[in-house]
Amino acid sequence: MIHFRWMPCQLKIETNICSGDYDGIILVSGSAPGSNEPEPFKTVLYAAAQIDAALGVIGAVLPINLLAKRFIYSPTGPLNMDYHDVRSFAEAATKGVKRALKAGVKCPLLVLLPDDRFENVELVTLLGALEGLYVPLEVREICPDRCYKACQLGVWSPICSKKLQGIVKLASALESGRYVARDIAALLLCVKLGGADPERMAPLRVEEYLAELFCGSNITMQVVSDQDTLLQEYPLFACVNRAASVIPRHAGRIIFLTYEPSACVLETIMIVGKGVTYDTGGADIKCQGIMAGMSRDKCGAAACAGFMQVVNLLQPPTVKVVAALCLVRNSVGENSYVADEVITAKSGARVRVGNTDAEGRMAMADALYYLKEMALCSVNPHLFTIATLTGHAVLTAGSGYSIAMDNSVARLTSNAEKLQASGEAIGDPFEISRIRREDFLIHQGRAEGDDILQALNKPSSKTPRGHQGPAAFLIKASGLDKHGIESEKPLKYCHLDVAGSAGDLPAQPTGSPILTLAKAFLFDKIEIKDP
């Protein structure tokens, strides 16, 4: 059972729809009201639809002859199966929960209905409901009486009890991971409570949070925070960290989280997450108001931590998982790094800085090198980087979509296509981009003694192929370019740009791509036992 501390509320499987433990029933449906619902909901909805033509689009709060008394109907609206996907059910569930809370419901009962058009509809609906119950960390700490929006969430469904138990167990693990990611990623903008505060999740505070989370768990935690060690072993990271390192509470650190499976390892997943706790842009400072919201630049590392919580709870028996969270504040000051500096990466590559606001790739490159070296002696390794890296990714795919970019080795296994299919199935969608020769050419060193140019001095949104270039940089700076398809030891690598899917203020962080990674690499490896 997942501790209440790491969930929006307690989940309970309910077998009696007439139970008096609830004060409101929420039903999410993708069908016309009064058509496919179980009784007594079908009769109530059919009658309501006769007097409200908009019922199937906007929903309603209706009286019902059950002990709960209130019936919150939250439809998806008409679905065009050519283009709609299962996200419509998550969105309707979130909307239904919020409407129930406004109606005064404290103990909601969620009705999960199957839909043959979508294989994971019950799971996605439940995740959407849980998302609507999340309370931001800062709100929980400032107002203890507001820690939980609901006493508990009951779950009732006409599907078989064993399947429902599996769905609830899986949803609990996934939502706990997203809960952790939301806590770390940022704090919800709340004018009455003073707004989002990047100090709350500065690098040291993230370390403290994770130490509590994984204490006594299946995850081991190693922290590299000594400034001399960072300078020697992670020189590109140390470069970004330089301005912040003189302030103890802002000093950067790299946190390694490792899960060792109980059985023989058949696959090794290795993830590096960008955790820029606040991004001023550095010496190339963000100006004209665009710095606001930059506490969200740690969503990649937050997703890594959340994914490790999912791994911790599901305990895949044959998958080893290693995550490196690169936590650093890109501060500006007398100790800032500046453009034109040439830094020797841990891989030995000489990197010329072109723009201090392209700090994310610098923060991750040495950790990626470290995991690459580990991968050379690991079983079936697959390397990932996860980052809110470029505005270009948002322009390319739009809000709500991550972008996957495989190297040549991963592309042979159709990895990006696997991620895209997994995301489509669970409501965490991906688009696919190719890394091309031009992406490497643009990062070639310009002067004698330079191996790599870190970035152009323009924002990615004004650069052709602005989201693919950073992936090429990471490949070159980490030494992964020496492990392509023609090398003696090819290594699979995929860069995930989640700038479009991570969530912008004032909306809460999404935790993307936790659901997709779990669906792609964990679901078929685990056996869901009864909770």
Image (spheres, helix red, strand yellow):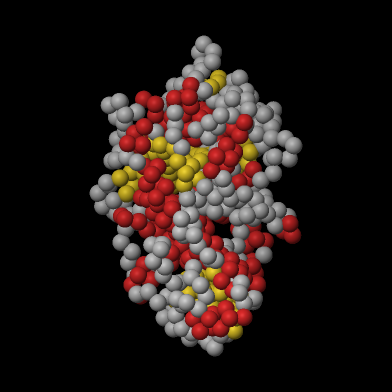
Q: Quadrant of the C terminus?
A: bottom left
Residue nearer the viewer, 292 or 418: 418
Q: Residue furthest left?
A: 264
Residue 233 seen in the figure: no
Q: Residue at x 64, y 43 (%)?
A: 294
Q: Residue at x 64, y 76 (%)?
A: 104
Q: Quadrant of residue 242?
A: top right
Residue 364 seen in the figure: yes
**Relative to residue 441, is residue 357 drawn left or right?**
right
Query: x, y (%) of residue 471?
Result: 47, 33
Query: x, y (%) of residue 156?
Result: 44, 76
Query: x, y (%) of residue 504?
Result: 62, 49
Q: Residue at x 47, y 50 (%)?
A: 429
Q: Residue furthest top?
A: 448
Relative to 108, say whether 350 is above or below: above
**Relative to residue 18, is residue 421 drawn left or right?**
left
Relative to 114, say whether 349 is above or below: above
Relative to 49, say whether 465 is above or below: above
Residue nearer the viewer, 168 or 31: 31
Q: Residue at x 52, y 58 (%)?
A: 179
Relative to 360, say whether 168 is above or below: below
Query: x, y (%) of residue 43?
Result: 51, 84
Q: Quadrant of residue 145?
A: bottom right
Q: Quadrant of the N terminus?
A: bottom left
